[in-house]
Amino acid sequence: LLDPSGSSKMSSEDESVIKNLVDRNHDGHVTLDELKLSLREWLPPSGNRSALVIVDLQNDFLVGSMPVAGGEAAVDLTNKLRNTINFDLVAHTRDWHPSDHCSFAANWGAEVFSMRKIPAVDDPSSTIDQVMWPTHCVQNEW
């Protein structure tokens, strides 16, 4: 949850708690299905409330280092929805990594989309399998 300046209104601890609630299988990634299931449980199926959740609608996924085919059409659709429906809540998520993020292939000299074992955050003596992504959605960059 961000204020208009793009600053987080929540502490990193609060963000972690929310992520853990939504990440049903606790794999460190929130899938669209996990988000949908959580929203269905949290929002009553009846009533007059509505929400629009805009997930990672960002330059790098539209025209940048990891473009999604047809992704630019999502901008027009999102704007049309916002201009057509008076949502009670509009929430945006964003992918937002430090430049030295452990999943960036460039930081390891690895091939993009390859798998690599990296040190586990909670136990540096063990490793986890990590997809090596192109550098994307770097904090405070385009």
Image (cartoon, grey):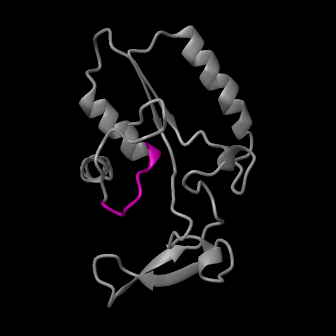
Does residue 58 lie above or below 40 as drawn?
below
Does residue 1 lie above or below 104 as drawn?
above
Q: Residue at x 67, y 44 (%)?
A: 59
Q: Which residues are magenta?
A: 26-32
**Residue 95 in the figure: left or right of residue 79:** left
Q: Is residue 114 magenta?
A: no
The quarter in which the N terminus is drawn is: top left
Estimate the x, y position of residue 40 in percent, counting from the top left.
Answer: 31, 31
**Residue 7 in the figure: left or right of residue 101:** left
Q: Quadrant of residue 50?
A: top left
**Residue 141 in the figure: left or right of residue 40:** right
Estimate the x, y position of residue 68 in percent, counting from the top left.
Answer: 69, 47
Estimate the x, y position of residue 8 in percent, counting from the top left.
Answer: 38, 42
Q: Quadrant of residue 135?
A: bottom right
Estimate the x, y position of residue 120 in percent, counting from the top left.
Answer: 36, 79
Closer-to-camera residue (4/81) = 4
Closer-to-camera residue (102/4) = 4
